[in-house]
Amino acid sequence: MSCHRDGLLEPEVPGYFLVDRDTVKIRVAKDISGIRTQTRFIKSLVVVGDTTAVFSNTGLAALPPTFPDLRPFQRQENKNLPFQYVAYGSSLTAGFRDGGYFNDGMATSYPMLIARQMGLKDFGAPTFSSESANGVGRVVPTTFNPTGGPAPKFKMVNNNLGITGVSGKDLVLEKHKNASKISNWAVTNSERWEFLHAFENERAFSDRFGQKGWSQSYADKYNPDSRPDLITLESGYTDLIKMISGETLRGSFEAVIMGGPDVGNKESALGFGSINSKTRERNYLLCIANLPDPLDTPLFHRVTGEEVYKNMVTGRDIVFRRGTDPKDCVFLMNSALDSLLSADVHFVFKEEIIRQYSGNRMKLGGPVNLKEYYREMGGGVYDHLRRYNSSLDLYSKTYNFPVVDLHSMFKAIREGRFITDDGVLVEFRYPNGNFYSHDGFYPTAFGQAVIANEFIKVLNRHYGMKIPLIHTREYLKYGNI
């Protein structure tokens, strides 16, 4: 099949397709019912089935005509080596998009695009084999709408996956066989607490990093005699999405915030302990992104609180508790809310949905009371976010490293006032806008290019690196697939 922005077409599927010039046989998973729940990392997506999909590789944008001279920015011990850039982070850094983690997404992750602009030839991601290029799967849009509700509907790709099985609650994934080639050490679906603990609990993804797993593979490559010249870090966006979706985090987000980017032995082992607290100097370049507001993403703006109140025929008193003004509320569109707002779903089933999720209203999509969400010292998601970003600003001044302001960028996109340096209006529209992928939280290839340019501008301004900007317009050809 092929995919386009207006829906899902399902003609006869070819027996073979091309992946990076390799001819690959279509391999459809016999039964993905056991893994579909595990692969749905964005819990708000309404997945109504699965499908076999072939994606055409449109190729990356042209490389810049000249590359910057990076020798002045290398560590002394690396002077005779190629410039070494290492990226750390979670799903955003890994190239997660369309509700999944797959080779095309990794190829257009913002660290990969930054590395291309610097002319780095050996910057590698933990890609799956060509035969398993769809990784843990991804979603594609469909016009099939069994509930008749307002949420976009998707089918999950069931072919050429990198999933070899399920062990308890964890997926078993195809391992990347050459950890020495990995430079993007982002771990999909990971929380900040897991980052500080070497991902000891996020095994499905961290164990992919070579036969020895994440921690040992890292130690083998980045020993004290060979450290990166540049480190970028993004971490915490996954935490916020989970928190606001009503999920329980494995560790204390608060403890991580108060720790800042240099919290002791755990991060020292990962390369962040080189900051000397007395001299405030380090021997590598560091750049960290702050956290966007999850409410600046489009899934919270598919319907208004007033629309939910008007169309809810049962359970209003449970969803909208006493004193709650629908005008002050937003909802996270998900399958439960989709059914509650559908005229085609019988009220008996709606009552059962209300009864089942009454103890955790976020599983009904909300409401998120905006007055409570944004109040000072609220102890909620935004208060965590605010304190993390404030701590990061303080550390950046103390230790002289720049911060990429994703918080302001995402807000500007929501308000329709973010235009790229090559003149493209970045769209908040969803679905089928140019920035947000099908999952409504993570960016398209174009969106990753926009983020990469924000990193590049900050690196150039703070360190004087003169990295050429990406022509983001060239990544619009990927569309929203």
Image: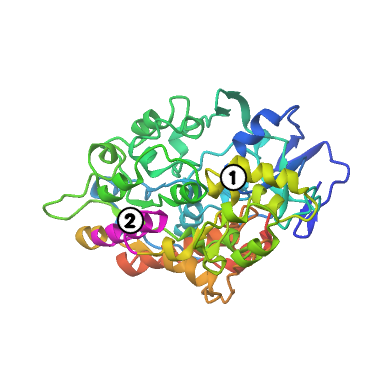
Left or right: where does residue 184 sit relative to residue 103? left
- Residue furthest to the right in view is 12
Q: CA distance from mark 2 to mark 1?
A: 24 Å
Give how far across and how far down residue 60 sits, in percent. 61, 56
Give how far across and how far down residue 229 sits, in percent. 32, 50
Q: Secondary structure at mark 1?
A: loop
The image shows residue 458, relative to residue 274, as above or below, that is below
Left or right: where does residue 77 sit relative to residue 343? left
Q: Amino acid at mark 1?
A: Lys
Q: Amino acid at mark 2?
A: Tyr
Residue at horizontal 15 percent and vertical 51 percent from the top: 277
The range drawn in magenta is: 376-394
Number of residues whose C-alpha sits closer than 10 Å to that of mark 2, classed few (under 14), some (14–19) or many (20 or more): many
Residue 129 in sight from this viewpoint: no
Q: Which numbered marker is on residue 43? A: 1
**For mark 2, what is the residue?**
388
Q: How many marks?
A: 2
The mark lying in front, picked from 2 and 1, is 1
